[in-house]
Amino acid sequence: MSFFGNVQLAPPVAVFKLSADFRADENPQKINLGVGAYRDDDGKPWVLPVVSKVEKQIASDSSLNHEYLPIKGLPEFCEAATKLALGDSKTISEGRAAGVQTLSGTGALRLAADFLFQTFPAETTVLYSNPTWGNHLDIFKRAGFKNLAPYSYWSGDIKAADISKFVSDLQSAPDRSIILFHSCAHNPTGADPSAEQWNQLAEVVRAKNHFPIFDTAYQGFASGDPDKDAAALRSFADAGFEMMICQSFAKNFGLYNERCGNLVTITQTSQILDNVRSQQELIVRANYSNPPAHGARIVANVLNTPDLASEWRQNIKQMSDRIDLMRNELRGRLEKLGTPGQWNHITDQIGMFSFTGLNPDQCNFLKNERSCYLMSNGRISMAGLNSKNIDYFAQCVDEAVR
Ligand code: PMP
């Protein structure tokens, strides 16, 4: 008798299944608009030129070896990453903010969730965005939280974020809830709060004693400028909140499979921070002992070398400019075709995704009949579009909508 005879077949993870279906499709016109990974105008993955340059330096540096990193990761990486999020913040100079290297953004979220579950009362409510990135809920559930509730975000009526409902949901949540924010380039909607709206959110977080945790997977992709994209993080940090920031370097360095991330914690005192990080260290130790080095070396090298850092900013700008161009081109084509409906949201939205407003039937038609692979909630990764496939995609959307 198998020990595992009662184990049920788990459902596939939607976005990875979509990529597998795309790979198996023999239609030469197929388009993958599922996974949030940057593609160049030839539809190819893009190794950032600054990353290639640093990888060559690393390969020829005989002083490097494959010894274990410290449990909390490569110190110069964690420092540079924390500074990228917070800028020249007094939280850093006062020793109240520091990072622990993690297995990309997912690992940062999981480490945060595990630590928060061991520290907060078990009945604490975790509020997440509706809609949100598919993994948020699973990460916090698997960490042990039982009370998870969505906060209102996207309004289908106005095809934009409805921040007043968001604020009132935070208002009516139990005091001292954990609030999971998207710091910029909201996934999947591409709609971010304005600076004024972030202030309103900060006010309610303060009034209700909530704990803010920011998912920062797209710093640089919203505006093309990583500093502008960090505005919400920096305003919360300056306002004196204790908070966490889950950073990913998958998208903005193109280091998807290197699993390079950083969990920043900001506390009231440096003593509290030391205690917190010592506990996070134990969680890492019991999970995977210590993180991988390659991605962290690349990021540290780039961010700590002014010439390379400015080259990196240009690389990001190039990615975000191409995405913006695709937004304009897609909207222009749909309007020219007279496709029923309004399409201004495609250019109003920012970041890697567009929340098209296409319904599940239209998405199924696009996938099954036209080999355009998009998530069934209507999200498309703008980076999957390019000058060669955009005419075809616009025509297919037109057909799907009519
Ligand atoms: N948060 C959001 C909102 C994301 O979209 C992603 C990637 N799809 C992540 C976190 C984490 O990605 P990774 O673990 O690859 O850094």
Image (cartoon, helix red, strand yellow):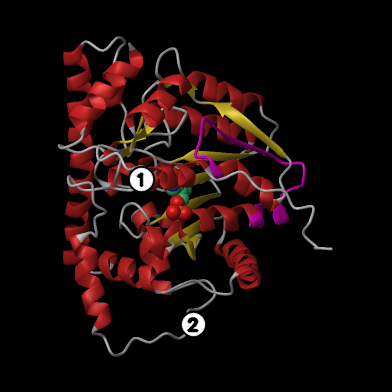
Q: Which residue is mark 2?
A: 68
Q: Position of residue 318 (x, y in %)?
A: 17, 47
Instruction: Answer with left or right where residue 16 lies relative to residue 320.
Output: right
Does residue 216 show up? no
Residue 18 to residue 91: above or below = above
State yes or no: discs 2 and 1 in contact (Cβ < 8 Å): no
Taking the spot 52% from the left edge, 71% from the top edge, the residue there is: 72
Instruction: Answer with left or right where residue 106 lies relative to residue 8.
Output: left
Picture quadrant where residue 300 is located: bottom left
> Marks 2 and 1, how far apart in space?
31 Å
- Could you classify mark 2 by the number of other residues whose Cα lies within 10 Å: few (under 14), some (14-19), or many (20 or more)? few
Q: Which residue is mark 1?
A: 230
Instruction: Answer with left or right where residue 330 lies relative to residue 247.
Output: left
Tell me the SS state at disc 2. loop
Per the rendering, the mark at residue 187 is none
Q: Is residue 219 magenta?
A: no
Most extreme residue toward the bottom is 62
**Amino acid under disc 1:** Ala
Quadrant holding the N terminus:
bottom right
Taking the spot 81% from the left edge, 63% from the top edge, the residue there is: 3
Instruction: Answer with left or right where residue 14 lies relative to residue 366.
Output: right
Mark 2 residue CB less than 8 A from any atom of ligand 1: no
Q: Is residue 126 magenta?
A: yes
Residue 331 to residue 302: above or below = above
Q: Position of residue 195 (x, y in %)?
A: 37, 31
Of 294 and 270, the residue lying toward us: 294
Quadrant holding the C terminus:
top left
**Amino acid under disc 2:** Tyr
- Which span of residues is magenta-colored? 114-135
